[in-house]
Amino acid sequence: MSRARQPPLVTGISPNEGISWTKVTIRGENLGTGPTDLIGLTICGHNCLLTAEWMSASKIVCRVGQAKNDKGDIIVTTKSGGKGTSTVSFKLLKPEKIGILDQSAVWVDEMNYYDMRTDRNKGIPPLSLRPANPLGIEIDKGRFPQKDLEALFPGMSADFTSENFSAAWYLIENHSTTSFDQLKTAVVNLKKQANKKNEGSLAYVKGGLSTFFEAQDALSAIHQKLEADGTEKVEGSMTQKLENVLNRASNTADTLFQEVLGRKDKADSTRNALNVLQRFKFLFNLPLNIERNIQKGDYDVVINDYEKAKSLFGKTEVQVFKKYYAEVETRIEALRELLLDKLLETPSTLHDQKRYIRYLSDLHAPGDPAWQCIGAQHQWILQLMHNCKESYVKEQKGNSLLHSPMLDLDSDVRPSPIGHLSQTASLKRGSSFQSGRDDAWRYKAPQQVVFVEKLTKLVVSQLPNFWKLWISYVNGSLFSETAEKSGQMERSKKNARQRQNDFKKMIQEVMYSLVKLIRGALLPFSLREGESRQYGGWEMKSELSGQWLTHVIQTVRLSSESLTALEIPNDMLQIIQDLILDLRVRCIIVTLQHTAEDIKRLAEKEDWVVDNEGLTSLPSQFEQCIIHSLQSLKTVLDCKPGEASVFQQQKTQEDVCQLSIGIMQVFIDCLEQLSTKPDGDIDTAHLSVDVSSPDLFGSIHEDSSLSSEQRLLIALSNCRYLERHTFLNIAEHFEKHGFQGLEKITQVSMESLKELDQRLFEMYIEFKADPIVGSLEPGIYAGYFDWKDCLVPAELYMAN
């Protein structure tokens, strides 16, 4: 599974310096094919993968964490390109205290946030209303160190809004080089600002003086006229007449203006109603606006409007307002249900999940939506895994293997030892080699192998988002990335501490299901009773070869490395390491068993052609078969980080030792079978003549068949070569690959080989001695004498 892409290269970062948690943009080349391809990101030695957002193959956005080094490289690691390099570096700055008059390239979080829309914290004016320059002259920063000023004015501050404000400190810091004339101008400016505060009431009085004097003049004129006319002497009758006239005038005026006044009252009422509608149209239009914004997906606007309405009309006693506010609550409740459905909908990206959780948090949704999302994601991953298994089992039972994907195993799987030996033997003898496998070892993958690749890819693609969702839930960043909602963050952290064990069980359940599903496909005998139905169900027509098991081991190892990169605790991933160990052991056992079967078929390849040393190609083929089998197990025998040796268990050592001895014994039996096979059973169609053979074996090539004595003699020569060279070479290869019990393997094999050599030698001697014995045997019995025909001596008879 070679990588086709170049390693990542970081060529730029903006900004190139900053304090911890600074948001940076990384640019470069080959930065991944997607969010799932990005498996590592470090800045100054700190892992920033959790905050990374993959934008494109040339852009990544993240936040710098608490780095260990002051300056370091930016390293990006991807699955497709591996670990990358960087041509730029990032400098980590130490945070400093920043005053309100200091220029800063970073945002300073305000403790008292002023929301102009919802009018929160009305008692605190926004910072923009404070004068930036109270003296009204140009500010000239001095070069006095801040520490010296703090020591000179202990307990004081240069902030003019502080209770401990020190004017001297402020002048030294901001006007140390200002001229005296400019300072006098500053004093004048301060006096003007102070006088403006007292001019308000006096200006009000001055503005009304003209009206006051006009009223006073009118009253004086009326008083003088009354005195001149002698109105003080008017009789009572005249006063009564005047009152009557005034009453009639009033009644007439009322009659004349009654209709006008009525219309005026209606107009005033209508105007007041319109004023109310205009003044409170926000509330009256809010239900309809909520529906429209929900349809457009502007949830932020809905939440802000709801917060404003809640603060203004949440506790109102006006019935009209209560009615409309209840309608708003109905719409908001429907929005909560909609957002919760979207949150629990799968599949979903991590970005959308965070967004919906924040919306629900702002809407004060009951329960814990974040934990509900984690639970739904967990169940969805488990369901995907089991659906994957069911689909492949159904496809296997339906005989649909023609649709299985093709895998190119040129780099992962080696040819079988028998095929390679045929090529080696043919080339050794100078003949042409015609391979029946011209498709570059391109096989159709078994369903179990394709299933394991699909299953591991599914878990590796889904588990990172699941893990990141939990990390965001733990640190509270689901609700706010700028610490604006500290209360919600604290509640989230508290809930996370209480549910830590529950999440650990979720991860363990995913790992358990992954391992059990792989065991059901490849190692069904390792499942307990009752688990076969849930995790098994495969038709095991024939066990997978060692080549396919090696391919599966590489796939599972890559998956384990990807999960380890997420910083998941090792105790949760231990079950995967146990699976890899069992697969490695099984691969070794199966490979050795198949090697024994291949060696059995070596008898069919014996051509009885001897070389200058009196040997056939059989010992060489046997040795090459063993060597290539061991080479195919090299990646299996090698231990990756965190893996244990396959020979750590005593039972595994004993099984491998017995299989190794069995392989040796199979070849010894093959030699014996070839040596003792009757003449009529020998296939002479493939025999060839080697003119370079010594005269001792010249008769072998003169005839088209071999006698029993000739086969025994060749077999004895092969046995002697096996004892002195082949078995010793094989033992060295076993030791090189870490096999245990070499002494026992060598001892038992040598003893069995010597016994065969002795038997063959005795058979050869017997064949050679038979003609001699046959010619001597008649002479031995020619003067046959039987003591029974002789008389017993009398003296001896009397003694008895």
Image (cartoon, rainbow, N blue to C red):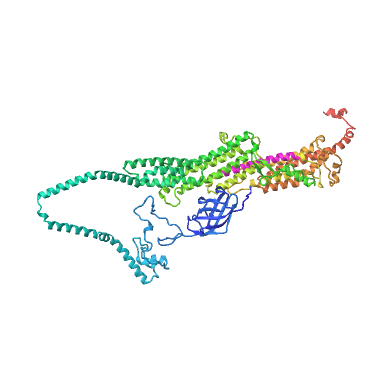
Q: Position of residue 135 (x, y in %)?
A: 36, 65
Q: Which residue is found at the position 62% from the left and 40% from the top?
A: 450
Which residue is farthest bottom?
180
Residue 750 visible somewhere in the drawing: no
Q: Is residue 147 above or below residue 7?
A: below
* Magenta highlight on residue 591: yes
Count of numbered circles in the view:
0
* Between 715 and 477, the one nearer to me in the picture: 477
Give x and y (percent) for residue 558.
59, 46
Magenta region's main secondary structure?
helix
Q: Is residue 660 left or right of residue 201?
A: right
The residue nearer to you, when weighing 105 against 757, is 105
Q: Range of the magenta residues?
A: 576-602
Residue plotted at (12% across, 56% down):
229
Q: Is residue 70 magenta?
A: no
Residue 479, horizontal then vertical, whole percent? 44, 48
Q: Is residue 515 above or below residue 143?
A: above
Left or right: where does residue 500 sit relative to residue 412? left
Check the picture and name the quadrant holding the C terminus: top right
User: Observer-nearest residue: 340 or 69?
Assistant: 340
In this rendering, does residue 17 appear at all? yes
Residue 543, position as x, y percentages in the image: 65, 37
Query: Residue 669: which quarter of the image?
Result: top right
Q: Nearer the viewer, residue 411 or 193?
A: 193
